Image: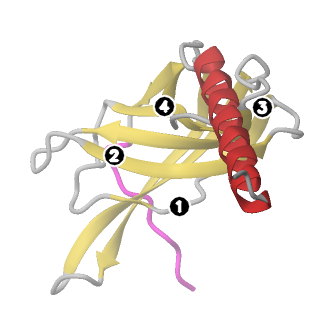
Amino acid sequence: MNTVLSRANSLFAFSLSVMAALTFGCFITTAFKERSVPVSIAVSRVTLKNVEDFTGPRERSDLGFVTFDITADLQSIFDWNVKQLFLYLSAEYSTKNNALNQVVLWDKIMLRGDNPRLSLKDMKSKYFFFDDGNGLKGNRNITLTLSWNVVPNAGILPLVTGSGHVSVPFPDTYETTKSY
């Protein structure tokens, strides 16, 4: 009546049901937790160049360089259901051509065992800050924001924006490179 295979199947199905219930419990205990923390962003240097854009015929585009400091304590985000954080600094601005431009300037993966206190000084952009035209020159409202994705052990991947940003005015003139 009850063979070894049917008993093994029942044990496997029961174990799978228990693991699914535990995984759901892991998710629900941290699903509604607030994951936003205060972030301090300071910009120490902004330069702007007008470089040749090789995607079009003899077009020139703006290339911005930003040096920044970031301070944040991410300790309260890490709990037993957080595996890692994907941090990224983005710039948002508007131009005549586009109502919303978003550019990622810097990113970092922070694992559970890493130091959760972020204190970065004189960091340079990790990625190029290109505009598809001349929208950076003289732009007075470029907002830098630190955001992160929480990668849990079980559950959804929330996208969180830190509660602190800075608006940076870009210069009205281009920096020229000296050629000798």
Query: Disc 2 versus disc 4: distance between alpha carbons?
Result: 10 Å
Task: State the CA–CA distance, disc 2 to disc 3.
Answer: 23 Å
Q: What stretch is highlighted in magenta?
A: 171-180
The verdict on residue 125 being magenta is: no
| Marks 4 and 3, how far apart at CA | 15 Å
Quarter residue 125 falls in: bottom right
Q: Which is nearer the N-term, disc 1 or disc 4? A: 1
Amino acid at the residue labelled 3: Leu
Q: Residue furthest front?
A: 1
Query: Which numbered disc flags the more N-terminal residue, 2 or 1?
Result: 2
Label drawn at residue 118: 3
Task: Tell me residue 101's x, y (percent).
Answer: 27, 46
The prevailing secondary structure element of the residues shown in magenta is loop
Residue, disc 4: 145
Q: Residues within 10 Å of mark 2 (few under 14, many from 20)?
A: some
Give neighbour class at mark 1: few <14, some 14-19, many 20+ (Cα, 10 Å).
few
Write down the residue under mark 2.
102
Q: In this view, does 132 lie to the left or right of 129?
A: left
* Residue positioned most to the left: 97
Residues under numbered marks 2 and 4 in contact, where contact means CB atoms less than 8 Å apart: no
Q: Is residue 39 visible?
A: no
Secondary structure under the numbered disc 3 in the rendered image: strand
For mark 2, give the secondary structure: strand
Mark 2 is on which residue type?
Gln
Q: Considering only vertical position in the picture, is 174 above or below 149?
A: below
Report the side of 117 relative to 47 (left or right). Answer: right
- For the residues labelled 1 and 3, say whether their Cβ atoms are less than 8 Å apart: no
Residue at point 70% right, 37% down? 19
Residue that label 1 marks = 127
